[in-house]
Image: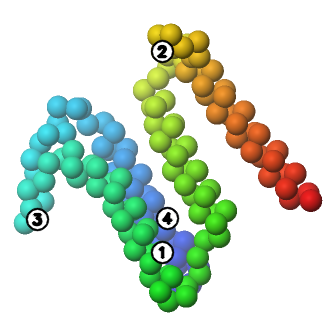
Amino acid sequence: MSNQETMKLIQEALDAHEEAIQKSSTLPTDKLGARLQIGQREVVLRNLLYQMVAHPREHSSEIKKILAMTNGPRATEAQDIMAQARESMANFLANFTSLDDSDLDRQFEGDERTIRAILQHVKEGHRYVLNAVDKALES
């Protein structure tokens, strides 16, 4: 498969993933317990949605195993860490899906930081990392 074919297949998988996320995000909580007949199996909708979390992880491990066994190309350690960073940031950003500007000023009882301050802190942390990477690349 050429790189162009690979990128097309990856994009198709991403598009299917995003389409499922967009539609699933509209589900009301009371529908998540619905039991559905999918082929030969009866599944609970909530469990099926959790498969969207587990399924890529499962097959990511499988792909890494295949590549290791066949001496195939693998991500560098830095690339692997950055892939985990993307996943972590996506989990962080999921907290903001239903917030508006006024919600950013909420704070936990007994804590002086607001959601806005935490978001600012994360932004500054990433800038700190960027500066450190720039310095490392200069030397």
Type of the residue with mark 4: Gln
List x then y, in percent, for residue 15.
43, 58
> Alpha-carbon neighbours of circle 3 within 10 Å: few (<14), some, or many (≥20)?
few
Q: CA distance from mark 3 to mark 1?
A: 30 Å
Tag 4's secondary structure? helix
Q: Which residue is mark 2?
A: 108
Residue drawn 64% across and 33% down? 122
Q: Which residue is mark 4?
A: 11
Mark 1 in CB contact with mark 4 (< 8 angstroms): no
Question: Can residue 102 be seen at all in this image of the molecule?
Answer: no
Q: Is residue 9 left or right of residue 4?
A: left
Mark 3 or mark 2, which is nearer the start of the sequence? 3
Q: Of tags 2 and 3, which is closer to the observer?
A: 2
Type of the residue with mark 3: Gly
Q: Which residue is mark 3?
A: 39
Q: Is residue 61 left or right of residue 41?
A: right
Q: Which residue is mark 1?
A: 64
Mark 3 in CB contact with mark 1 (< 8 angstroms): no
Q: Of tags 1 and 4, which is closer to the observer?
A: 1
Q: Which residue lies most toward the front here?
A: 110
Mark 4 or mark 1, which is nearer the start of the sequence? 4
Mark 1 or mark 3, which is nearer the start of the sequence? 3
Mark 2 or mark 4, which is nearer the start of the sequence? 4
